Every structure is written in C-alpha cells, then in structure tokens.
Image (cartoon, rainbow, N blue to C red):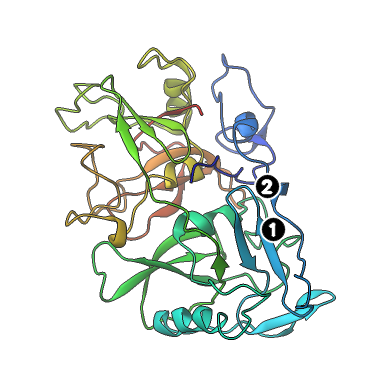
Amino acid sequence: MASKIYQTGSTTCYNDSGTAKCASTSSSHPSQDFDLSNLSLSRNNFSTPTTNSGFINDLITRDPSINLTWTTCPIGRSGTGPACNIGSTTTSTKAAAITACSNLNSGSGFAGITNWRLPTSAEMHRIVNISNGPRNDPAYFPNGVSGNFWLTESDADSPTTFSARIDFTSFGNSEPLSNAGPAGILCVSGDSFEYQRYKDLGNGVIQEMRSGLFYQKCVRDSLDSINCSATPTATSNWSSALQYCDTLILGSRSDWRLPNIFELLALVRFKNDATADARYIDTSFFTNNPYLSSISDAFHTSSTWINNPVNDLTVRFGFQNLMAAGGKTSNRHVRCVAGP
C-alpha cells in the first residue's frame, strides 16, 4: 500500500539555537522540515472522531489515505462529549494488549468492525505530532493518548523479551519496552501498512517503494558512493548536514534534502520484518554503514526538538533508543532523501 508520509507537525524553521525565518537554498540552514512540508501529506487528512450507524458509543478516527480506522479512545476510555472523557487509559502487558484489541472483534465488533489489532510502528507514527505537548493531534485523538503505547513489532535484539512501543511523552519516539509493560493500547483496523520495499537503482540511490522516496545508499563521506565499500568515519553538525544534502547531486537528482524525522524513521525495521541481522535497518540494501550499538551513533534529521531548539531529532539504527534529541552543533551521520 503506497502512501506519502504525514507531515511531522513542525510549524516553523530554526537555526542552531532558536526559531528563524524559513530560508532560501543559499542560507546556512536550508531545506529543513517545515520548509518542505508540502512534500508530505497534510495532518488534517484524518477524520474528526465519528461513529458508524448503529454504534453510537463506539468512537473511531479514520485515516483515509491508507484506509485505516483507529479507536479514537485508548482501551479503558470512552465518552462522546467531549470524547474519551470517561474512565482512564488501561496499561497492560504486550500479551494483554493483543487480547484487548482482539476482544473488540467479538459479536458485531467495535463500531461494527471485526478486524481490530495492535498497530505497527509505521502506522502509529502517522498520528505522532512533534509540534505540541501531547505529541498527537487532540482534534483526532482527544484525551488519553499520552505515555507509552504498544506496537505489534518485537525488538530486533531481544524479540522474546522486548517489544516496540511509542512514547507520546517527549518525542513520539519508538523504543523497545519489556513485554511485561505496562503500556497503553490503541487499536487499528484495515489492511496492515506494509513494511519497506526497496529497489537498488545501481547509482548510489535506493528507492523505497512504499512511500515513493529516494534515499542515499551510502552514508555521507563513504569512500565509494555507489557500493559503500568502506565504512565512513566523517560526521557533520546540523547546519553542515542541511547544506550537504541541499547541494548533493546523486543519481541524476538534485532535489536532495536532509530527511525529516518521519522520513528517516521510515527506514527503521523491527524483528518481525528483519533477518537474523539484529540491526534496525535492512543492511542488504544499506550496506557497510555505521550501525553500532552506541548512543553516539546517530543520524541528523531536519526536524528540530521544539522543547529545546538547540537540538534536532536524531535516529539510531543500532541502539535500542531509536529516536532521541541531540545538540545541533554535535557531529553526527548524514543520509539524504529526495522525492517523492
């Protein structure tokens, strides 16, 4: 199921220390998240909470771009005016969360729908909004979507002990959590949002078929930009990373940019989509790159952490804390994106 990635919710542009006027391509901080938000799917594409005929107490929120339907309220909450104002969010183990979504399928189903399940990371990230306190969109998911929520994937390193979750508290980041929990439960229905499908174009570019985006195969400063024959050691600060991608010409494309947080997270995979390789990225396509289990082994994105704008949001592909915030003046790895 192909689909554009949703906008992150970023509402302004930044320099290394605070907000700034959105810049031209000749500036020191070009082509960042909000600057290019028109390339992503608008966040107002969701439906406001609604009900299906005959199920007036079963609130749902639709994501029509990929034909998904969500329970508007987390398990444990209900109410229609204002929505989800009755009860409290249930937190549970991973196994109990799977059962809770499955229980919605009994009889006529919740809202008349009988294929409820836990969401994947790619699906849940579509409701993350990095621009506000709750890290979600209260207009579509009012009350209760805060803290940790279960995802269906297992952890790449310890699949029998840990599973993926999204934390709506600080970044909306996906990280492993013990299967014993606790975490909240938001259920989704519809065809599963497919995992990454890649095509190596043979010119230093990998196309991700799900989103239509094009990714730089080799990390910046690899000695071989086509086959990544040597692991790069050079890293860049945020300004340099933005400028590098903005001026990159690769595979006959000149529309490269530093990816926003969702565009880079789109490369993350978990164990049920992985081979025996425990890295959080498909190393059969993105070869010989730095994916060490180190807290410093991070990649810059074009998204700023609004709580403290001296930091950008970063992604790590070999460490359990996959998404974090790091100082913009710190040197980190760079992989550019283009399209769709």
Residue 39 x %, y %: 60, 31
Per the image, the residue denoted by label 2 is 43
- Of the image marks 1 and 2, the number of the one nearer the N terminus: 2
What SS does tag 2 mark? Answer: helix
Query: Do the CB atoms of the residues marked 1 and 2 lie less than 8 Å apart?
Result: yes
Taking the spot 69% from the left edge, 68% from the top edge, the residue there is 60
For label 1, count other residues whose C-alpha is less than 10 Å away and answer few (under 14), some (14-19) or many (20+).
many
Give coordinates of residue 45: x percent, y percent: 70, 48
Give amino acid for label 1. Answer: Asp
- Residue placed most toward the observer, 74 or 259: 74
Whether residue 274 sits left or right of residue 44 in the image: it is left
Q: Would you name the residue on which mark 1 appears?
A: 137
Dot label at residue 173: none
Q: What kind of element bears circle 1?
A: loop
Residue 322 drawn above or below residue 284: below
Q: Tell which of 27 and 186 is nearer to you.
A: 186
Task: Give the distance between the C-alpha atoms of the residues marked 1 and 2, in whole angstroms.
Answer: 9 Å
Residue name at image x 22 percent, y 31 percent: 232
Position in image of residue 215 (x %, y %): 38, 31
